[in-house]
Image (cartoon, helix red, strand yellow):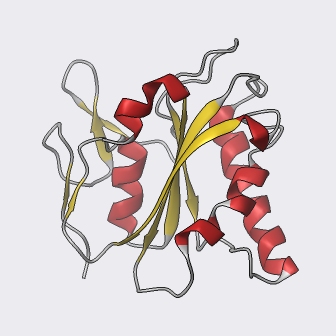
Amino acid sequence: MSASVRSETGFVAGLHRRSHRNQLVPQPEHLSLASPDLGDSLVPWSVVVQGRPASIQSKPKTKQVWQIAVKAAAKAAWGSSGPVTADVAVRMIYFTTAPTQGDVDNRIKWTLDALNKVVYQDDKQVVQVLAAEVLQNQTLNLGFAPPILLQALAANNDFVFLMVQDPASVGRLLQ
């Protein structure tokens, strides 16, 4: 069973997004919500990483494979701008197709570590984290849903959605 997803723009999960002129355009495989900045302020940026995130209790090989996947997806979406030096807020949502065992907080560390030297210099810059695990077979109300999240949900596979943004936008992060 797949999730029924509707964003605040009113379109259901699929392979298209609305352009600024309300035209439908094809989704590229790796699309970030916004381009990373070249200075110390960060605009919202997001990426989808396919698979199940490694937890603190995972075997070393599992942790390594997950970090390689996160780093590769982040590099592809982030580009060559270099890591930001300012503090950041991170939203990490694990969308799963079946119930899982384990704690949400144990799934954060290896993902944040993998973004070191790509998105930010060091994960000590992460001053706010919002983490969740969501079953995809339920109806989801995703008012914040960027196109890459809708596209990933349409595929109905396990994945992690990451959004990195300025911590000053915490009001929007928690909405």
Residue 30 makes an appearance in the image: no
* Horizontal relation, residue 104 to residue 17: left or right: right
Residue 138 lies in what quarter of the image?
Answer: bottom left
In the image, 3 versus 17, the foreground residue is 3
Residue 131 locus on image (x, y percent): 50, 57
Residue 111, placed above or below residue 74: below
Instruction: Residue at 53%, 61% (x, y): give it.
Output: 160
* Horizontal relation, residue 43 to residue 70: left or right: left
* Horizontal relation, residue 155 to residue 17: left or right: right
Instruction: Residue at 28%, 54% (x, y): give it.
Output: 14
Give the farthest residue toward the left: 10
Q: Which quadrant of the figure contains the C terminus?
A: top left
Residue 107 lies in what quarter of the image?
Answer: bottom right
The count of marks equals 0
Instruction: Residue at 21%, 18% (x, y): give it.
Output: 21
In the image, 56 versus 15, the foreground residue is 56
Give the farthest residue toward the top: 39
Give the farthest residue toward the right: 60
Residue 95 locus on image (x, y percent): 43, 67
* Horizontal relation, residue 97 to residue 9: left or right: right
Q: Which quadrant of the figure contains the N terminus?
A: bottom left
Residue 31 makes an appearance in the image: yes
Instruction: Residue at 21%, 45% (x, y): give it.
Output: 7
Give the farthest residue toward the front: 127
In the image, 54 versus 51, the foreground residue is 54
Residue 20 locus on image (x, y percent): 27, 19
Residue 147 locus on image (x, y percent): 36, 42
